[in-house]
Amino acid sequence: MQKKKKYLYGPVPSRRLGRSLGVDIVPFKLCTLDCVYCQLGRTTEITIERGDFVPIEAVLAELREKLSEGLEADYITVSGSGEPTLNSRLGEFVESIKKITTIPVAILTNGTLMYREDVRAACAKADVVLPSLDAGDERTFQRINRPHKDISIEKLIDGLSEFRKEFAGQIWLEVFLVGDMNTDIEQIDKIKDAIERIRPDKIQLNTAVRPTADADIRRLDAEKLKTIATQLGPKCEVVADFSYHFTDKYAENMAEDVLSMLKRRPCSLNDICSALGIPHNETLKYISHFQSQGRIESERRDGTTYFKAN
């Protein structure tokens, strides 16, 4: 049996990136935002201070081992359980990946630090950068994304606009839609204006299909998403995954490991992640898959949600 990786997970099937090998280089829930829809729960530390959070050499050692096993992936994706651009060695890390493999590198980021020249330079070393934009004005930005006090919507849009001027690779902009928050005609028009400034190669619409930080978040149905995609133009596509079907062997095996664990005893999200060595956002996909089938139920005790198999 292969030992679990500490910093890598997958490859997992991704609606946005195909077969994606995930790399986690920041601590859990260390972020510049505290988004109402985050499937990982509330941000534990909101910061804009970059730091050297994980031993990059150890991450690269895991990657070399994975490559030696015959890794097949469409992308190596720097993402994980927090905001990856907070890692001050991000650029060095991407450069090192490119020295040992030809698999393209993607960075999943909320884009809030792109106003910084060093962050733009680091991200520009990747092949694809996937930032986010969930609001067209400051009021909606504060309501949905709850940013660090030094981040504004204008700073975010300006940073992404500057990045577009400097980056020759692909920019795939995610817009996360929340019912009654950023879906009226006025807000969609403002988001569209911001998109025209940023000039991404793709716009990808998402909505809440798994449990969110705030319990009352309203997800959009597929038809509403398609309507808004049409409003935003031909570069826009819907990426929200309502199906929870796992066709990838790794994902099937990991899903079964999660179910097997929950058949033995009730576990919290942290219990599952620690035992199986997979990040929180991936674990939630498996939980949601089985919840949609009625095979897992949840119970809240002393502020913590526990899951158990029926």
Image (spheres, rainbow, N blue to C red):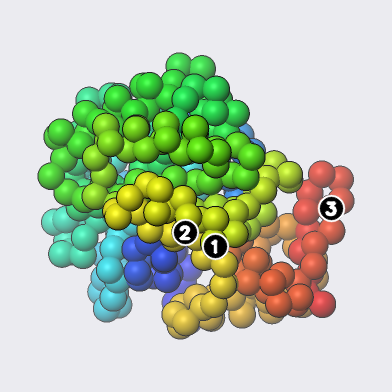
Residue highlighted by disc 3: 300
Residue 57 position, x and y percent, is 29, 49
Tell me, yes or no, whether the two marked residues, 2 and 1, touch with CB atoms within 8 Å: yes
- Name the N-terminal-most of marks 3 and 1: 1
- Name the N-terminal-most of marks 3 and 2: 2
Q: Look at label 2 and name its amino acid.
A: Lys
Q: Residues within 10 Å of mark 2 (few under 14, many from 20)?
A: some
- The structure residue drawn at horizontal position 35% and vertical position 54%, both measured from the top left corner, is 236
Alpha-carbon span between mark 3 and mark 1: 30 Å
Q: Residues within 10 Å of mark 1 (few under 14, many from 20)?
A: some
Q: Look at label 3 and name its amino acid.
A: Arg
In this rendering, would 269 be left or right of 243?
right
Q: Residues within 10 Å of mark 3 (few under 14, many from 20)?
A: few
Is residue 213 at least partly visible in the picture?
A: no
Q: Which mark is residue 226?
A: 2
Is label 3 or label 1 in front?
1
Q: Look at label 1 and name its amino acid.
A: Ala
Alpha-carbon span between mark 3 and mark 2: 35 Å
Is residue 42 at least partly visible in the picture?
A: yes
Q: Secondary structure at mark 3?
A: strand
Where 244 sits versus 232, above or below? Answer: below
Q: Secondary structure at mark 2?
A: helix
Residue highlighted by disc 1: 222
Alpha-carbon span between mark 2 and mark 1: 6 Å
- The structure residue drawn at horizontal position 36% and vertical position 43%, both measured from the top left corner, is 131
Between residue 129 and residue 302, name the one nearer to us: 129
Q: Secondary structure at mark 1?
A: helix
